[in-house]
Amino acid sequence: MNSLSALTRPCLALVTDRSMVPGRLEATVSEAVAGGVNLVQLREKALSAGELLALGKRLRLRTQGRALLFINDRVDVALACEADGVQLPEDGLPVAETHRLAGLALSVGRSVHNVAGAVAAAEAGADLLIAGTIYLSRSHPEGEAAGPALITQIRAALPRFSGLLLGIGGITKDNAREVLAAGADGVAVISSILGAPNVRLAAQELRTAMVSEAEAQR
């Protein structure tokens, strides 16, 4: 459960969507990690457990020693492929129960959409909170975007939270600094890396923007 504590901050997390890079997900993840991604969340809901495990094992080989690997929702798959953590959806398993099942083998993240959800997850022992939707995005093109204010509100409600707080939703190299300025430890992205013509460069530009803001805060 200490893998996140050793993670270089700011954290740049990539959430996978293989439909955006058909037949190229593994190579794309490698390029993204080379560009500065240091946490990969494998989120492929359409795959069977066996398919997800096989893919998780292949991504584990590509990320080992280079980036943390989290598996979305499936504690069993995360354990079986020796991932670093599991990322629970807001309606997924309880955080405390997941810790009981995983023991010390996995860090436990929770996706949250409001302050109440973030407080509940943190109090239950979440190591990582991914909060959004910050800006409207390809995966969430409709509805309301909370904006960076959601990050500020969560920070104010959880002044002693020692885990990582990331923003997600429509984050790009042009607005990532705003999310960090609001109090995030990093960002999680999908389209701004997977949809880029040069994945490695897209990751590098995101990391550069975040590092610039982090240095400005010192």
Image (tube, rainbow, N blue to C red):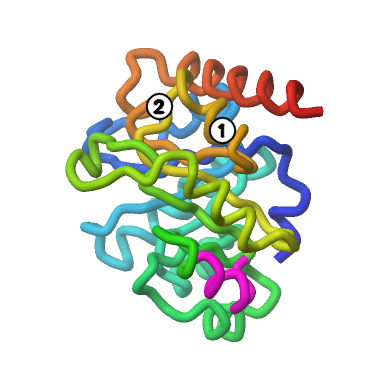
Looking at the figure, which quarter contains the N terminus? bottom right
Q: Is residue 133 magenta?
A: no
Residue 117: x and y, percent?
46, 68
Question: In terms of depth relative to the viewer, which is nearer, 182 or 98?
Answer: 182
**Label 1 CA crowd tier, 10 Å (few <14, some 14–19, many 20+):** many
Q: Main secondary structure of the magenta part?
A: helix
For label 2, the SS is helix
Query: Please, what is the three-letter code of the amino acid marked with disc 1?
Result: Val
Q: Which residue is mark 1?
A: 37
Image side of residue 181 versus residue 75, left or right: right
Do labels 1 and 2 touch, CB within 8 Å?
A: yes
Left or right: 67 as drawn, with respect to 71: right
Label 1: element kind: loop
Dot 2 alpha-carbon crowd within 10 angstroms: few under 14, some 14 to 19, many 20 or more: many
Task: Kindly give the residue lying farthest to the left in the view shown.
Answer: 142
Distance from the alpha carbon under mark 1 to that under mark 2: 10 Å
Residue drawn where x is 49% and y is 53% of the image:
130
What is the number of callouts on the image?
A: 2
**Residue 167 vertical position relative to residue 27 in the rendered view, above or below:** below
Q: Nearer the viewer, residue 160 or 162?
A: 160
Amino acid type for the residue under numbered disc 2: Ile
Boundaries of the magenta span: 118-126
Which residue does the image show at 57% across and 67% down from the upper left? 108
- On residue 193, the disc is 2
Quadrant of the snapshot with the C terminus: top right
